[in-house]
Image (cartoon, helix red, strand yellow):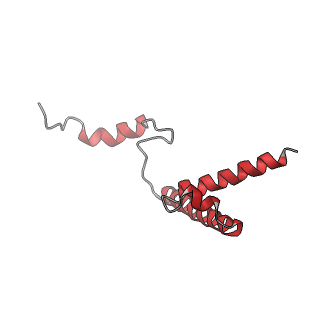
Amino acid sequence: MEIAPQIRINLFKQIHEIVFHGKGGYDYNTVYHMPIWLRKFTFYELKKFYDAEAEATKSVSKKSNQTNMVNPDGTVNTPAFKVASQPYKGQSSYK
């Protein structure tokens, strides 16, 4: 008898995803009262868009030979920063 709560959780997650990733195009009440077929269609179209966007970003970053100065966890990539800053060593404009 655990199916009914899980169905409600999935419904509210789907509504949240549409409202959140719809970037202001949808409000909770509108999505909640959408016909099921339209809500599912909207959800999968948003999912398809964001998956394609993530894939494009991933492919561009793989093709690029640039080194990131910031690691995926948000910390500074110290070796890359040190190498990139070498041409500017001792060239400050302040005294």
Q: Residue at x 81, y 49 (%)?
A: 4
Q: Nearer the viewer, residue 91 or 43?
A: 43
Residue 29, visible in the rendered structure: yes
Q: Nearer the viewer, residue 95 or 15?
A: 15
Q: Residue furthest top?
A: 95
Whole-percent x, y for residue 12 in the image:
67, 51
Q: Residue furthest right?
A: 1
Q: Is residue 2 above or below residue 60?
A: above
Residue 59 located left or right of residue 14: left
Q: Nearer the viewer, residue 93 or 17?
A: 17
Quarter of the rendering containing residue 78: top left
Q: Is residue 48 above or below residue 12?
A: below
Whole-percent x, y for residue 82 in the image:
36, 36
Q: Is residue 33 above or below residue 84?
A: below
Q: Residue at x 45, y 57 (%)?
A: 64
Q: Could you tell me which quadrant the N terminus lies in?
A: top right
Whole-percent x, y for residue 75 in the image:
45, 35
Q: Is residue 82 above or below residue 45?
A: above
Q: Residue furthest left?
A: 95
Q: Could you tell me which quadrant the C terminus lies in?
A: top left
Residue 51, visible in the rendered structure: no
Residue 58 located left or right of residue 10: left
Residue 4 located left or right of residue 67: right
Whole-percent x, y for residue 47 in the image:
61, 61
Number of marks: 0
Quarter of the rendering containing residue 90: top left
